[in-house]
Structure formats: structure tokens, C-alpha cells
Amino acid sequence: MAGPYDVVVIGSGMGGSTCAWALARRGARVLVLERGERLPREPANADPREVFLRRRYKPEETWLDGSPVPSRRGPLSGLGSRRGRPGIAPNGSGPPPRPFAPGVHYVVGGNTKVYGASLPRFRERDFEAVEHADGLSPAWPFGYQDLEQYYVEAEALYRVHGTTGEDPTEPWRSAPYPYPAMPHEPYIAELADRLRSRGVHPASNAMGVDRREGGGCIRCRTCDGFPCPYGAKSDAETCALDPAIATGRVDLMTGARVRHLVASGRRVDHLVVSTGEGTRTIRGERFVLAAGAVNSAALLLASDDDRHPAGLGNRTGLVGRNFMMHNNAHVAAVDVDRTNDVVFAKTLSVNDWYHELGTLQLIGKVQGVMMKSWATTVPLRLLDLLARRSVEWLVMTEDLPHRDNRVVRAADGSIMTMRTALNTGTHRRLHRRAVELLRQCGYDAVFTQWFDISMNSHQCGTVVAGADPATSVLDPWCRMHEVDNLWVVDGSFFPSSAAMNPALTIAAQALRVVAESELGG
């Protein structure tokens, strides 16, 4: 199928591919632009040295960290409070920006090709205003009840396996999970019993993998953080984009990097796109920007013109501001008397303190060579020994929005992020509680890797949605207040980060936007 296109989608991650799928079902003609290529299925998909040490699937790209305190200098560095000015050095002074390699993936399917496939819903309270010690988590311009039917649809589309009745914080549901939860392997089942004995309520993770009858998932140990060589991970390419292309209504153009959105009046007229064959002009009736919270904001800022001198749709100066990414730490708990023989480990969470502090989630089984990517001075033999006796958790706490935490364009046009983490006192409390809990469960030692800016985990908030054009960039259905035919459907629109993995919420909102706004025709 060739143009003209009803909708042109920039980016093929969770937001872009889900939009393309939903639009195809409504009969729209869609072009999806992806700056990368399809990620090959090859032996290296499951090789931790290739994936973690050699960064085989990450781009040769450098961003700048413009935060006033080096974000990689020690645990939870760059602490801030609502009384300070995160991301801005006093009087413009401070250290020069520091280059770093971002944790993003420019491939068809985006970051979902290597994500851990944890697909929980946000809780009802996550859509409401909540006051924290470090500041306000603002209300969303729609509630959980407005998104719930689309959560149901997204769970079916992304083959989510889960169960109800275990998690004390789980939200109400109008339909059960489409597939039963992934069963725990014996080591994890015993761990769950130990946790219950300490008074908490471990619950099965909501996982997007193909464990249907006849499905392709073999429960291998190289799932979380790895591409799936079997096509059994519920990534955006597999579950949404490829089925959309199969309808004959969706085209995919790879190797196509959008450089500018060119507006005429209140409408985007065309895109300027770099390809391997030179620069092209791409036209459409409507446009969806879904390049990820950092890249989407950067592209809007780069699309300045006489009418939009601060960037497209940026009359309020809010594009790129309120940048958030969860406060995350990776915890490895070691029991010297027990060997962890688990293959597929990511089946359990503890959310008893979710509304107060955040969540504890098991991650995929870590191998010694994977630890080497950050424990660079520790001998591999020792790391292997630890890995055989460890279980790994993600300690995740909500970040909070602040206008001075932002994405900007550096003088040479490259991307610069400026962020001082907020809500870090809460994160420290959750970490202490997690360590105490694990020690009570019999673990002899607990080691922590604090995530820094290079992880870019769960980036969101840079093109925020809201009902008031004076305080937001998008309306509640993700259309720009200032541009009539442009929608931004990725983590950019989040008014707050919550403390849950964002992918299912992005997918559900994509389905809602297509169903309820003019994007769907």
C-alpha cells in the first residue's frame, strides 16, 4: 500500500504500534516511521556478553547529563526537595554536561523488544492528586474508570498472564486476566512462603509472554533485558505492529529518522525525514508522535519556526519539562546455603507498601556476566558464585514532576537531560524495608545497584496531558492544544509517574485515544 496516508505514526514502540493496530481496525491507512531496523533473531539475542557488556542492540549515540550534581556519583546522588531547583546549577554555574550512553533502543518495537514484559495496571489512586514529602503527584485529566475498558483490551492484545485476589492494592476489574498467571518455580514458591511468614502478601506478576496453549514461550532465563529469539515476548512489534501490517492498511518504513515537523497554521503539514537514500518529505492528514518521552520532546523542540519559536506546540514553555523516571534500585539478596536454580524468575511482587512507598518486583535471573556490566572491578568468578545463590529484586518508587527537570537541546543539537531525582527519601525508606524483609527471610547479604540517568528507566512526563492549555501541552486524549492534527502517545503524556511499569498504561491510552478522539476518524 502506498500513500496518501490518513495517519503517520512516528515511532514503533508501545504507543506507536498500538495506535497503528487500533487505527487499522477502524479502516485507516497508516504509515509507521521507525528510525531503526527490525531486530534480527540470532544466537546473540540470548548472549549476556553481547547484550549487556557489548551493548549489541543499543545505539551508538551519546546524550548529555546537565544535572548540577553528577548523577552517577554514588547511591541516590542528586537528591533534591521541592524547595530547591532540580536540574539547574546556581547562577548558571556548575560542572559541564557529562556525556552518557542512553539506555534506549532504536529498533522496530522500540524498548519493548528488550523490556521485562511486566504489564501491571496503575492503581486507582495513581490517577489522583497525592501529596508526598518532596512534592505533589498531580491528578491526571482522566481517571482509572475512564481507562479500565482499554486496560481490558490491552491485556488481551498483549497476552497478559495474571491472577486476582493476591495483591492488596490491585484495582477493580470488569474482566479477568485473559490468561492465568505464570506459575512459580519451586525456589520462588518457597520464597513466597517465607515472605508470607513475615506478614506481607506476595502476588503474581502480570506478565506479557506467550504461554497460551501452543504458545512460543519456553520460560528461558534470557527474557528480562534480552530480545526474544522465539517471538514469544509480548512486545509491540509482535503483538500490535505485525498484525496491523497484516491487514494491508499499515506500511512500515524503517531507517527513517524524523528531523522536523513542519506546521502550517495550526496543523502539521509534513515531516522532514532522513533515510538511507536522502531526505524525504512525508505527508499525512493526522500525525502521532510516539518516539519516547525524551525523543518526542526533543523532536518538538527541534521543530521551531516563526509561529512556534520555542518549539512546536510550546507556547507555554512546558515541552520537555517535568521529566520523570522512576527511582529504581536493583537488589541482589544472597543466601549462601541455597542455590537458586530458577530459570524464569520474574513471577512475584510485593505491593503491601505501594501507596506509601512503592513496589518490590522480582526481575529476571541475573547471571554473573550481567553483574559485570556495573560491578566492573569484581572478579567474574566471584560474581558467578554470587549469582548462583542470589535472587534479584527491583525496588521502585515514584518520581515526582518538577518543571526544572527537563529535556533540552544542547548547542550542537544533541539531547541533554537535566534531572535531580525527587521522592528519594521515600525510595530510601522502601529500600531499607526491602533489605530488612529479605534478611528476615533468611538472606545473608544484600547488594544494591542504584540506577542512574543512563538507565532511562520508564521515562515520562515531558509533554504532559491536562484539561487546561495554560498548564499542559496535550488535552486528555493526547492531542496538542496548539496543533489540531498532532497527538503524542507515549510516556510523554503522563502527569505523574506512579510506581508501576508504564507500558500497559501507554497501550491502554493509545486504544482510548483512537476510540474516543478525532485521531480514529
Image: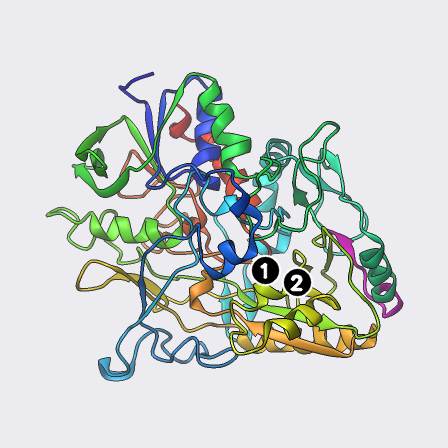
Q: Look at the image and say whether residue 197 sits in the magenta stretch.
A: yes
Total marks in image: 2
Mark 2 neighbour density, 10 Å: few (under 14) some (14–19) many (20 or more): many
Q: Residue at x 56, y 52 (%)?
A: 47
Q: Amino acid at mark 2?
A: Thr
Q: Which residues are magenta?
A: 196-204
Q: Quadrant of residue 156?
A: top right
Callout 2 touching callout 1 (CB < 8 Å): yes
Q: Look at the image and say whether residue 328 sits in the magenta stretch.
A: no
Numbered label attached to residue 359: 2
Report the front residue among 296 and 482.
296
Horizontal side of 171 relative to 277 (left or right) equals right
Q: Amino acid at mark 1?
A: Ala
Q: Secondary structure at mark 2?
A: strand
Numbered label attached to residue 499: 1
x%, y% of residue 185? 81, 51
Q: Secondary structure at mark 1?
A: loop
Farthest front residue? 381
Q: Quadrant of residue 413?
A: bottom left
Horizontal side of 265 relative to 400 (left or right) equals left
Numbered label attached to residue 57: none
Report the front residue among 173 and 79.
79
Horizontal side of 368 relative to 212 (left or right) equals left
Q: Residue at x 67, y 33 (%)?
A: 216
Residue 314 visible here: no
Q: Is residue 245 above or below residue 225?
A: above
x%, y% of residue 262? 18, 39
x%, y% of residue 364? 65, 56
Q: Is residue 207 above or below residue 435?
A: above
Horizontal side of 107 relative to 374 (left or right) equals left
